[in-house]
Image (cartoon, rainbow, N blue to C red):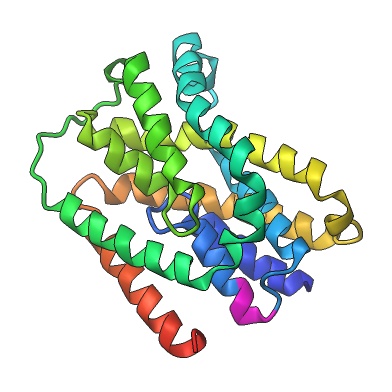
């Protein structure tokens, strides 16, 4: 992987990590289009630079990470993903990340889900109130997030839609979803570094570029998304997912 390719993928990761369109799907599809998808290094690269984007949340929300009650709820929400991730890590990396069918189908089904979800009419509060998230709700949010172990599902879409379905206001679940990404991707990155030291050896320049670029791009993406959802639904993201899957299949899938 060249430094330029790492730059491109870092931008893609930063933009897509927090939008409900699946950063993993975008990284895998872009990697295939660039001609190096499927290698052991590219799989590790995709996981590690995701943590670069996640660090942007720490910078933007560091005060909330000092709230003990919020931290306890994040820990509860992380439990399902942590358990499932440890048990299916090998299957995910060796089989699911290589399956174009799984990724494109997940994009389409997730897109349909977002469009249907966006038709719901619910009263929204403007302020952020993590008090809405009880420990029971936090556990349910974690279960929704665990669905995103399937490439293409979108971690943010799963948590935002799931949280909204159990009665949490949109802005609250969006920001909680941002924060929940931190322990989730930290665990995934540390585990992958431990398991894939040989694959990433000698490719530190590409990793560094992708990591740093995804961090700064994600800050802009988070601010844009928070402004966007004030007066808009998630339907546009659903149509985008469906369109991406169809176009990619027609151009690269055969």
| Residue closest to the eye, 119 or 56 | 119
Residue plotted at (59% across, 47% down): 53
Compared across the picture, whether 251 is left or right of 199 comes to left
Q: Is residue 11 in view?
A: no
Tell me if 179 is positioned left or right of 105 in this view: right
| Side (left or right) of 251 relative to 158 | right
Q: Looking at this view, is 68 or 40 the one in front?
A: 40
Q: Quadrant of the N terminus?
A: bottom right
Residue at the spot x=89%, y=54% of the render? Answer: 198
Whole-percent x and y of residue 237?
A: 30, 61
Q: Residue furthest top?
A: 68
Q: Is residue 229 left or right of residue 106?
A: left
Seen at 77% across and 62% down, the residue is 41
Q: What stretch is highlighted in magenta?
A: 31-35
Q: x%, y% of residue 43?
A: 69, 60
Instruction: Count how many numbered circles sit on residues in the image.
Output: 0
Q: Quadrant of residue 73?
A: top left
Residue 76 within the segment the image draws in magenta: no
Q: Does the magenta stretch include residue 32?
A: yes
Nearest the viewer among 1 and 36 is: 36
- Along the line of sight, which residue is nearer the eye, 20 or 52? 20
For residue 172, what is the image quadrant? Answer: top left
Q: Residue at x 57, y 65 (%)?
A: 27
């Amino acid at each position: 992987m060249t430094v330029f390719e790492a730059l491109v993928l870092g931008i893609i990761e930063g933009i897509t990590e927090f939008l409900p369109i699946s950063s993993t799907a975008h990284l895998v599809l872009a990697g295939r289009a660039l001609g190096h998808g499927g290698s052991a290094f590219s799989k590790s690269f995709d996981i590690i630079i995701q943590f670069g984007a996640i660090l942007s949340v720490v910078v933007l929300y560091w005060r909330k990470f000092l709230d003990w009650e919020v931290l306890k709820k994040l820990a509860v929400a992380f439990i399902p993903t942590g358990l499932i991730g440890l048990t299916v890590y090998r299957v995910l990396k060796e089989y699911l990340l290589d399956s174009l069918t799984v990724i494109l189908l997940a994009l389409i089904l997730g897109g349909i889900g977002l469009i249907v979800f966006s038709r719901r009419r619910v009263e929204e509060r403007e302020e952020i109130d993590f008090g809405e998230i009880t420990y029971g709700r936090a556990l349910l949010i974690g279960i929704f997030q665990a669905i995103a172990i399937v490439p293409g599902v979108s971690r943010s879409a799963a948590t935002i839609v799931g949280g909204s379905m159990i009665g949490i206001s949109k802005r609250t679940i969006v920001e909680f979803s941002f924060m929940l990404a931190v322990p989730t991707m930290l665990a995934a990155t540390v585990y992958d570094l431990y398991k894939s030291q040989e694959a990433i050896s000698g490719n530190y320049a590409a990793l560094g570029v992708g990591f740093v670029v995804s961090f700064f791009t994600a800050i802009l993406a988070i601010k844009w998304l928070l402004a966007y959802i004030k007066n808009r639904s998630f339907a546009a993201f659903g149509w985008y997912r469906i369109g991406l899957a169809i176009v990619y299949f027609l151009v690269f899938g055969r």
